[in-house]
Every structure is written in C-alpha cells, then in structure tokens.
Image (cartoon, rainbow, N blue to C red):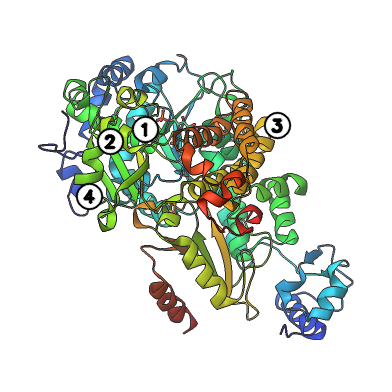
Amino acid sequence: MRSKSILQILKILDSSHKRDGNDSKRPLPEFCIYLKPYAFDLTPDLTLVTYNLPLITYIMFSFTKENLQRIEAEKKKYPTVESAVMPVLWIAQEQNGNWLSEAAIKATADVLDLSPAHVIGVASFYTMYNKQPVGKYHLQVCSNISCSLLGAKKLIHHLENKLAITHGETTQDGLYTFSEVECLGSCGTAPAMQINDDYHENLTIEKMDELLKGLEK
Amino acid sequence: MISLAGYEKVILPDIPNLNQIAVYEKHGGYEGLKKAVALSQDDVINEVKKSGLRGRGGAGFPTGLKWSFMPKGDKVRYLACNGDEGEPGTFKDRQIFEFNPHLFIEGTLIACYAMGIKTAYVYIRGEYIKWINILQASLDEAYAKGYVGQNILGKGFNTDIVIHRGAGAYICGEESSLMNSLEGKRPYPRIKPPFPAQVGLWGQPTTINNIETLANAAVILRKGADWYSKIGAEKHPGPVLYGISGHVNKPGVYEGPTGMSLKELIYDVAGGIKNGKKLKAVIPGGSSTPILTPESVEKATMDADGLRAVGTSMGTAGIIVMDEDTDLVEALHILSKFYHHESCGQCTPCREGTGWLEKIVGKFAAGIANQQDYDLLLKICANMEGRTVCALADAAAWPVRNTITRFKEEFEARMIENKNKAGWDYSMKAVSGV
Ligand SMILES: Cc1cc2nc3c(=O)[nH]c(=O)nc-3n(C[C@H](O)[C@H](O)[C@H](O)COP(=O)(O)O)c2cc1C
Ligand code: SF4
Ligand code: FES
C-alpha cells in the first residue's frame, strides 16, 4: 500500500521550503515542478486523481555560495560559458539530492545565461541526469551483452521481485531506485552494477543480497 | 606466428603504484616527452607515422597521418582525448586510467607538442567517476612537477589538460558528438566535411584520439618508432589491450602484440571456455564488429588484415565469447535494443531503422517471426548502412546483418513456420521489453 497522504506531502514540501530560508506565507513561487505521483507515495486513489492533473508543488532551488564558486571555476575551463553546462548540471544534481528539478534546471540556465529550454535539451539527452527523484540508493544494473551472458537477467528479476519495483521505479520508503543500464565498462568482471557512484562487479544473487543487507544498516 | 611468449608489457606493466609520479619516473616515465621536446614538431609526427600506430578507438585510422592533417600556423587548436568507452564489450581505457594514468598524460603532452595545442580536453564517461578522480590526482602531480601547465620542461611550451565528465550517452564517443557535448550543445554528431582538423571544437582545428592511442604515442617516443613497429602485425603493429569477456574462464584485459591468434587469446590467455563447453560464436572487437563462427575463429588473427580476411574488423579489441548454449537471437536482441536506445534520432534511417531492427529481432526472440521478417531485416540494414550522419547506424546494422546470415539456422528455427519442428515456447515478453 502506498501510504503518505497529501497533507503529509504538503508538510514535507513546506518544511523544505522553510529550510531554504523562505517565508512560507509568500505567494506561490515562480518555480513549479510537476511531480510524478509515485515519487511521493500517493495513495492509489490520489494517484488516480492527480495522474492527469499533475500535482503542482514548489521546491525552491538556488545554488549555495560554495557551489557558485565551483561554477565560476568550471566556467574558466572552457572558452565559452555555454560549455560549462554539463559540469554545472552535475553540481546542480548533487546539491538537489541526486536529481534535477525544473527549478534546478532554471537556476543552471540563469547562472550560465542560457535559456532554460536549451538546458533542458541538454539534460534530457543524457541518462545520468535524473529527471525525477531517485531513492537514496540508485541501483544501476547492466543488462548489456557481456553481463547478460553471465546471468544479468536473473539478477534483474531477483532484484525486481525483492524490491517490487521495475526499471525506473523507486521503493515506497524512498530507499531504492532500480535502473537497467547499458554497458558499464565492466564486461571483464560481469555481471556488474553501480550503486550510486560505486561499482560492484562479479555479482551473484547472494552477493547482491549481501550488498543490499549492508545498505539497510 | 605472433604470440604472447616473450612479450614485454609496456602499456600496463606489472609495476605496483605506477599511478604515482615518482614510481612512474623511476621506470622511464616522461622520458618520451623529454625526447619529443628535443625534436621539431614535424619530427615527432614523422616518428609516430613511422611507428605504424593506428587508432585504438574503433576506426583504426593511422595516428601520425591524423596528426599531420592539423593546419600549420598559430590558430588556436584543441586535442580531445576520447575516454567515453561506451562500446559494449570494451573496458580497456579504464585500466589505463587506473594503472598507468601518467602514460596517457605523457602521450597527450606529446600530441599537444607535436600539433602546437595549448588545451587538451579529456572526455570521460560519467559512470567512471572513480577513474576520473584517479586521473585528476595524477594530473595534479604532473602539474606540480612541471610536466603540465606553463613552460613545460623549461622549453617554453604550454599545455593545459582539462577533464570533462560525460553523463551517460554512448553517442558521445563519436568524435563530432563528443565535440558538441564538450561545447555544451545537445550532442548530435556533425555532418562531415568539414573535418575536425579544419573545423572542430569551438570552430577551431581539433584532433580526437582514443586514450589507448595516446598512451601508445608515449611508448613510441620513449622506445623509438623502429622498436615499436617490430611489435605484432607488420601493417598494424604495436601493443594492444585485448578485453576478453563472456563465457571464458579468465575474463579480463590482457596486453599483447597485435596479430595474435584469436584462438590463443581465448583458449590460452583467457583460460578457455567456461565449464568445458564448446564455442558457438565470438564478437572480436566490441559489439559493432561482425560476429564470427567457430570456423572463422580458427583462422582469425587480431589485426586489420587478419580480421578483414574473415569478414570482420578489429574495432576496440573487445572480444566477446559465447558458448554453445548461448541464445544468439536473444544476444542480438540485446544489441539491437542498445543501438535503438542510443540513436540520437537525427537521421531518419537510423532513428526509424534501429527501432525496427529491435522490434523485428524481438519477434524472432519471441518465436513469432516469419521468412518475410528475415528478408525485411536485411532490407532495413541496407537502408541504414552508409546513409547517415555518423557510423552508429552502420554499427547497429552490421551485427544484425552478420548474425542473421552467419547463424541463419538459429533464426530459421525461431520462425513461426518451423514452430512444430523446434518445439519452442517463448513468451511475448521479449517483444514488448523495450
Ligand atoms: C557511435 C560511435 C561511438 C564511438 N565511441 C567511441 C568511444 O567510446 N571511444 C573512442 O575512443 N572512440 C569511439 N568512437 C570512435 C571515434 O569516433 C573516433 O574515431 C576515435 O575516438 C578516434 O580516435 P583514434 O583515432 O585514436 O582511434 C565511436 C564512434 C562511433 C561511430
Ligand atoms: S546515424 Fe544515428 S546516431 Fe548517428 S547522427 Fe544519425 S541518428 Fe544520430
Ligand atoms: S556488458 Fe555489462 S559492463 Fe559491459
């Protein structure tokens, strides 16, 4: 059962709004994002209600002072400011809890003096820029040829059954997101997966269970 | 016959902590660079030409010749080092980053000196954050020691090396897509001509080389072109990193001379087929290269000519081995799905063609295809090959064309006409599994 009520969600949003040092009584901020319902664990009926009428929420995003300095350093590495868009998107994603909200994209565009449409165009091309929230642990299992020859499909079935999610989904507790990914460059140590940035290779079902157990703690 | 016996490793030698600059220097590190800066720029290019080095990124283009395409004069120019390493079955550049990063840095500096380049960008796939950090640490050391930066070795030549992290797109390994990616644009491949040596990064002359290619350049300058050109196959010489994966006992990256027999690599170097099974098929150079039957594997040597003779190519030397139990239809389906996913969508034959290839190979996987589907696959391949902006369409079509013709029986057995003969039971899942 999906559990959180709409009230709880609004509370979460409200508190993050406040944490950002904003006055919560301010009118609706200009940055809005459309959240896929499952990202916030809506009850099934609410999912139905909100599916066609996306829940409009407001999550503020502005770069921290430290990150603004990092961005300046990135800009200096290239002859044009536009070229810094990928490194700045990485910084934005890192600051925003491993995904890019529309607000984060807009902030990226602003800081580089680019149009948001251009930045969305770039961000949407790449699989590693997450366009929706991901869990605390992003399990990225390779399903390409060398891994599949050594049982990647079995690992994937096991993981999907165990966590009750499929490609691109997040568990209700927000802990795990599972993605099937293309070749990770670990074909010689297949099957392989990445948990967030870390590689785990020569996987077996037992090894995977061990790993997951380690994460829960 | 060329064999591993007596071969001395130079790209990935068994020296611990070679990623530390002091250790690297103790083993001849940066000697190649010192020799290079004592020569004229043209002499360095000629040395690389003489060595016979050919690119290790997939296309096998002669490196010295590529360098000589860069125009003279003092126009700003760039080097792009290709560490995108996205080709399934390829996992060699990351070994260089991890175990011998300075060799790559040294090769990059030599290339920059030879072509008068002041900035080199190293494009590394986003997943490789661990190796990006390793390379950055080595790069910092090299800066501190005065090998990179201003007035290198007191010779008044300046070069900066900048690492750029990709974000998960196979197409960014294609050189012109890589340039658009670096420029912060949507990374669509560019129409050629103009070629990068005329109009490359930010409109300036640019050379693109693979990581392993640049590491080889450092070896050439250190040991001399004469020494280098005697290693391996005469027309395609040098050390090469073979990546062996799939159903073998000891998968991994192995350094050896070019021109080794594929059989030796599979049965001796990689310890033979797992569980004593028989061989069914081998993809010799990364997923885009045409697949080989066991009869061809018997004859094949790992160099351009040797592989052309059996109707395939060297690619990235990523050897994917499949045993007798492998479902080749499913294997091809995985590859077709991959190319469909990675097509940038710019050209109609590729955007539509990769989608249809995946769908129709999926029909075979599900056992609901017929003879017309088989013919249609060949027709789609013909409509993709050589008709697009970049070579991804060819890379998608070749595996299909070659797998379905060289292993025709496997595909015929999955046709609906042969349902009773084969006694199959395949679910619909494969068709819908996008
Ligand atoms: C779809 C596609 C993907 C490619 N991916 C890579 C790659 O990941 N790494 C690489 O070095 N070359 C890749 N290449 C080849 C490059 O376009 C280019 O030929 C190569 O980097 C040149 O370097 P070299 O001359 O040193 O081999 C790719 C080519 C195509 C068509
Ligand atoms: S061939 Fe495919 S990947 Fe290459 S430019 Fe055309 S559509 Fe894009
Ligand atoms: S095929 Fe899985 S890492 Fe290369």
At which x and y percent is residue A11? 77, 83
- Answer with the quadrant where ligand 2 appears in the image: top right
Q: Are marks 1 and 2 in contact (CB under 8 Å)?
A: yes
On what subunit does the disc labeled 2 rest?
Answer: B
Residue B240, numbered circle: 2
State which mark lies toward you, 2 or 3. 3
Residue B107 sits in quarter: top left
Gap in angstroms between the C-alphas marked 4 and 3: 47 Å
Going from N to C along the chain, the mark reached first, 4 or 3, is: 4
Q: Secondary structure at mark 1?
A: loop
Q: Secondary structure at mark 3?
A: helix
Compared with A154, B351 (above or below) is: above
Going from N to C along the chain, the mark reached first, 2 or 3, is: 2
Query: Which residue type does callout 2 highlight?
Result: Val
> Can you identify the residue that label 1 sits on?
B56
Q: Secondary structure at mark 4?
A: loop
Q: State whether discs 4 and 3 lie on one chain.
A: yes
